[in-house]
Image (cartoon, rainbow, N blue to C red):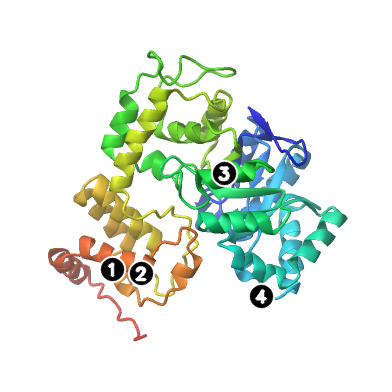
């Protein structure tokens, strides 16, 4: 595992961090056996930065239980987050934080973030409630190590937040699909002058790993792994690299190529992925990509951005929808219809929207209440997007088929009450 230095503390942070938002689940909740396998594989692979949050249902409890059971709390740094959107009064700071300590079974959170700041106004709301005094008190007590924030807003607002408080680290979204999105390359470089920058969504919610158009996949596959100037004339150090890089590997390597990225978070879903990414992290030094490789990213970016109509990462912050619309699932199918063909997208859409059932999860249920848009980190115009989605995915012939399907199955859709 490679490590990059936290400029504030001198700590060595693993360049690969485990994002704990997407632990495998069963109907009852997080699959603890699988989650433990992932966490332990990460620790054994040299990962020492684990990112969770109050908003990631069951994640803090799972991480805390595994660390305590295996007595490895002292081998890792825990990052968690204050749920800013839920804070209504000053007493909420301590209430949420105390519960997070209990869930994580620890007496200190090493890296604590203000979760999902969208602009200076969201920080000023907290300062108006006395957050700075509370932070100072908790840091003095030793219950908070480093204080930072995660950002989901425009580049200009990111710079304002940076200047508004003596932050010790920050977390931003960054990947090769758009290096100017949100904080962007400018924000990354500015913040990295004085603090470690943690990178989230390096694979855009998995879209850069499993959701690439065929044309983009062909570009990656055509690049000679061991060719002249190719993606590697062989491993730089450590464990051997795979003969062919996967789309996920290409995505992670692009971020690691930036020396300003202290930790790159990956929401790995099984121990095999952990082992593969740890081996990759052991061999991806900053500045190691060749000019030929960077041109491959440029070409893939052009293809991907032309096909990806909605930049939904599937994070689920918009859920649950009061009208039961499966927003992430429907948008995923919509994007699929552009880069894999309409029929492939429709097959996915029929499942995502559950049209065969009495109560569907389709966009027709939407009453434009706006709840989803206030929670979306990507600032997607969800309401307008669902309207466009429905036009493409539910033309008249499709609506006729859906009606016939319900009639055949005897599952007449229950009418929804008027808004």
Image quarter where the C terminus lies is bottom left
Q: Quadrant of residue 149?
A: bottom right
Q: How crowded is mark 2: few (under 14 residues within 10 Å), some or many (20 or more)?
A: some
Left or right for 351, reference 248:
left
Asked whether the viewer can see residue 358, the reply is no
Q: Residues within 10 Å of mark 4 (few under 14, many from 20)?
A: few
Query: Secondary structure under badge 1?
Result: helix
- Rendering coords of residue 31 (x, y %): 56, 49
What residue do we see at 46% from left, 73% from top?
Answer: 371
In front of the other: 58 or 229: 229
Query: Secondary structure under badge 2?
Result: helix
What is the spatial separation of the Cα atoms under label 4 and label 1, in whole angstroms? 33 Å
The residue tagged 3 is 188
Q: Quadrant of residue 57?
A: bottom right
Circle nearer the N terminus (4, 3)? 4
Q: Single out the mark in the foreground, 2 or 3.
A: 3
The tag on residue 113 is none
What residue do we see at 71% from left, 59% from top?
Answer: 100
What is the spatial separation of the Cα atoms under label 4 and label 3, in whole angstroms? 31 Å
């Amino acid at each position: 595992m490679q490590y990059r230095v936290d400029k504030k503390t001198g700590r060595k942070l693993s360049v690969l961090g485990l994002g704990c938002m997407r632990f495998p689940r069963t109907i009852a909740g997080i699959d603890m056996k699988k989650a433990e396998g992932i966490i332990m594989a990460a620790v054994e692979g040299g990962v020492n930065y684990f990112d969770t949050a109050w908003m990631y249902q069951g994640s803090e409890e799972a991480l805390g239980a595994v660390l305590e059971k295996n007595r490895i709390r002292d081998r890792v740094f825990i990052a968690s987050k204050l749920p800013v959107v839920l804070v209504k009064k000053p007493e909420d700071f301590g209430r949420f934080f105390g519960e997070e300590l209990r869930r994580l079974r620890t007496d200190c959170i090493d890296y604590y973030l203000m979760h999902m700041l969208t602009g200076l106004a969201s920080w000023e709301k907290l300062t108006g409630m006395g957050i700075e005094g509370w932070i100072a008190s908790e840091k003095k007590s030793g219950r908070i190590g480093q204080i930072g924030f995660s950002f989901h807003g425009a580049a200009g607002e990111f710079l304002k937040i940076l200047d508004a408080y003596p932050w010790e680290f920050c977390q931003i979204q960054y990947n090769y699909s758009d290096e100017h999105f949100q904080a962007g390359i400018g924000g990354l470089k500015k913040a990295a002058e004085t603090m470690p920058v943690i990178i989230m969504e390096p694979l855009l919610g998995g879209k850069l790993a499993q959701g690439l158009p065929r044309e983009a996949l062909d570009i990656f596959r055509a690049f000679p792994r061991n060719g002249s100037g190719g993606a590697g004339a062989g491993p730089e150090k450590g464990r051997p690299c795979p003969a062919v890089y996967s789309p996920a590997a290409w995505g992670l390597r692009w971020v690691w190529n930036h020396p300003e990225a202290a930790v790159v978070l990956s929401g790995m879903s099984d121990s095999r992925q952990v082992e593969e990414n740890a081996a990759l992290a052991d061999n991806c030094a900053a500045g190691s990509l060749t000019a030929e490789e960077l041109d491959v990213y440029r070409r893939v970016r052009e293809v991907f951005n032309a096909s990806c109509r909605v930049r939904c990462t599937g994070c689920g912050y918009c859920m649950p929808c009061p009208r039961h619309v499966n927003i992430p699932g429907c948008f995923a199918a919509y994007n699929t219809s552009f880069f894999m063909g309409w029929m492939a997208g429709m097959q996915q859409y029929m499942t995502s929207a559950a049209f065969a059932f009495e109560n569907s999860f389709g966009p027709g249920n939407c009453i434009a209440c706006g709840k989803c848009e206030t929670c979306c980190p990507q600032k997607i115009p969800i309401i307008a997007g669902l309207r466009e989605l429905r036009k493409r995915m539910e033309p008249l012939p499709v609506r006729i088929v859906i009606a016939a399907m319900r009639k055949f199955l005897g599952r007449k859709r229950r009418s929804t009450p008027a808004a």
